[in-house]
Amino acid sequence: MLNADKTEVMNTCLSYKCNYDDDVVIDDLSISPSPCTKFLGVFIDNKLSFNQHVDSLITKCNSRVFLLRKLRTIGLDVQGLKTFYYSNIRSVISYAAQAWFSLLGEHNRERLERIQRSCTKIMLPESEYPDRLAILNMTMLSEFLFELSLSHFNKIRGDEGLPLFDRLVFNKNKTSSACNVYSVQRNAKHEFFPIFYELH
């Protein structure tokens, strides 16, 4: 049974034309739908844009970028700065990325990329971003998050004992400009919903 005092309602629809705002009644308690909720550290909004989650990541990372700049000022070498970035900034951004990265729009992906761009500039202020990545042996942040997510879904498809094994299928449809690497199996009980997109 649901505990009404600990229950939050959110109606999700990808179309901005949808507007489901009817209250839900549990144990005579009326609960109004929330536009956004935090679940296991990830902000999920009712349009699955993850705008608020990206806002939260940027806020968290800005203070860490400030610390990175201070570490360079006191003389920490490039390798030390890179280690700090991996352990204190990129790790924050990549948390649960498998759940939200594929649904990010280009604007939000670029907002996150700016964080890495700023961090690498602190490490190597005289070089351009592509050169900095080459020197530091790093990929673009969007590519890193893509590979991280793809690895997760490949792991699911490689283990028949995992709950999502039968639902996750490789998408062979190449007609879309942003084709899916994997998609959820369509069946009578579940609507089709794309969950992972290929970078271009």
Image (cartoon, helix red, strand yellow):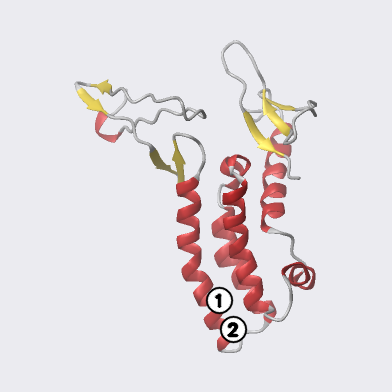
- Residue 114 image-quadrant placement: bottom right
Q: Residue at x 57, y 41 (%)?
A: 99
Q: In the rendered image, which residue does mark 2 sit on?
A: 72
Q: Residue furthest front?
A: 17
- Against 88, residue 26 (above or below) is above
Q: Residue at x 55, y 79 (%)?
A: 69
Mark 1: which amino acid? Leu
Q: Residue furthest bottom?
A: 74
User: Mark 2 and mark 1 in contact (Cβ < 8 Å)?
Assistant: yes
Could you say whether the residue bearing mark 2 is in a helix, strand or loop? helix
Mark 2: which amino acid? Arg
Position of the N terminus by quadrant: top left
Return the x and y of residue 2 as percentages of the image width and height.
Answer: 31, 26
Q: Residue at x 68, y 42 (%)?
A: 152
Q: Residue furthest top?
A: 188
Return the x and y of residue 73 as percentages of the image width and height.
Answer: 56, 87
Q: Residue at x 49, y 67 (%)?
A: 62
Q: Please indicate whether residue 109 sits to the left or right of residue 50 in the image.
A: right
In 3D space, how far apart are the residues under numbered discs 1 and 2 (Cα atoms)?
Answer: 6 Å
Q: Please indicate whether residue 137 sits to the left or right of residue 92 in the image.
A: right
